[in-house]
Amino acid sequence: MTSLFNSPDLNNALDWLGTQHGAMLELVQDLCNQNSGTFHAQGVAAVVDRLLDEFKGAGKYPPLGDWVEQQPTPAAEILNDQGHIDAFPLGPTLRAEARPNVAHQVFLCIHTDTVYDLAHPFQKCQFLTNGHLNGPGVIDAKGGLVVLLFALRAFERTSLASRLGWKVVLNPDEEIGSLGSHSILKSVAQQCRFGLLFEPVMPDGAMVSSRKGSGNFTLVCRGKSAHAGRNFAAGRNAIVHLARCVTELDALNHTVPGDSTVNIGRLHGGGAVNVVPDFAMARINVRGVDPEQIDRIMGHIRDVVARFSRDADYQLNLTGQITSPPKVLDAASRLIQERIEVTGRHLGVPIHWRPSGGASDGNKLSGWGIPNIDTLGPVGDHLHSPDEYLVVDSLVQRARLAAALLMSFATEPLGTQ
């Protein structure tokens, strides 16, 4: 790749990105000041409308790709606190692509939703005293949206662009596990050789090498209601039975080898305190570092539930699945890592790696056999909190890295080195 690093194409793209800091920062603020909590479908649609305009060519920028469109996202089906399935409408998914007939295709993805709903007090951006930008979604993941967009703009300005095809999916529901967009992600990603996702890097600039698998489960317990005074003995307290069960599930954290976790995230049940409750529900998150570990922990969970189900006075029902398989560092993903390391050295961007317990859509790609790196977004910290911030200088830095990486794959496709 020595020829790339000495090419006018690369230097011109990097220089051009250096002139785009103000535009990138302005767009981040515009996107963050528009609420796009996952279940605020209209807000997500407003963000997608803005991004659609950007892909079609906003102001001084030419259009990106051969086509761009937004399409409906299937509703997210979620078990409610009464044990019934509700369908939640979601905002649209944005899709774009360039040169679909080129042999080498890269999948580019990041989400448009945030964890901050309309009722959350954290709604607007502000600059901190150290120059960092504080705001809802500044790094998770509206900063990543901007990095992706401007990296593509820089790449498309080069003569190398004709050698690499790309497909973009901007989905509206990653923060709830991509429950609605799952099928869209899969159908598009499977047309590509590898994936680049624009989740934020860690505060020290570390990129994620591997991720735990994750899944959410619901355990419903049904007992028998009775008057707590006149007929207490006739009741079967679902809350108590469920509490005993989840206490044993929690104890699995200390018995299964490895770094697997079982988190009892929420308990719900009962009503009037003079009634023996006949319904209770637990929300549970399960994580593990590899498929074998997840199989072991899920086997133990099912054994515990089965044991508590033997009491004929109660009914227990466990639903859910591992929606994000473990993202294990395989040989193909390591090739992408090596390319990033070489590119980073040339650009003067230190590259180092660290495993993460968090999940992303990169987990899903790995589960479908698509190698990917999922932390090409900007630098910042405190995501999912009102302290979320963006290191503003990292916008251009990470866009340069992503653009140069695309140029490297256009010059020397993955797996040919």
Image: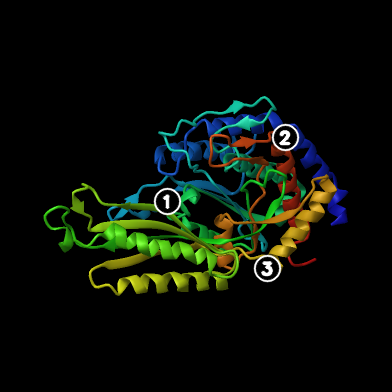
Look at mark 2 in the image and give the residue it sits on: 393
Q: From where the camera sits, is residue 51 visible?
A: yes
CA distance separating discs 3 and 2: 32 Å
Between the residue at mark 3 and the residue at mark 1, the CA separation in whole angstroms equals 31 Å
> Dots 1 and 2: beta carbons under 8 Å?
no
Residue linked to disc 1: 73
Residue beneath the point at 71% across and 33% down: 20
Tag 2: amino acid: Asp
Left or right of 22 in this view: 170: left
Residue 6 in the image, given as x and y percentages of width and height: 88, 49
10 Å crowding of disc 2: few (<14), some (14-19), many (20+): some
Q: Residue at x 22, y 47 (%)?
A: 273
Specify the amino acid type for callout 3: Asp
Neighbor class of circle 3 (other Cα within 10 Å; few <14, some 14-19, many 20+) is some
Specify how the rendered protein is coloured.
rainbow
The residue identified by callout 3 is: 330
Q: Quadrant of the C terminus?
A: bottom right
Q: CA distance from mark 1 to mark 2?
A: 34 Å
**Front-lying residue, 319 or 26:** 319
Tell me which corner region of the image, top left, top right, bottom left or bottom right, holds residue 138: top right
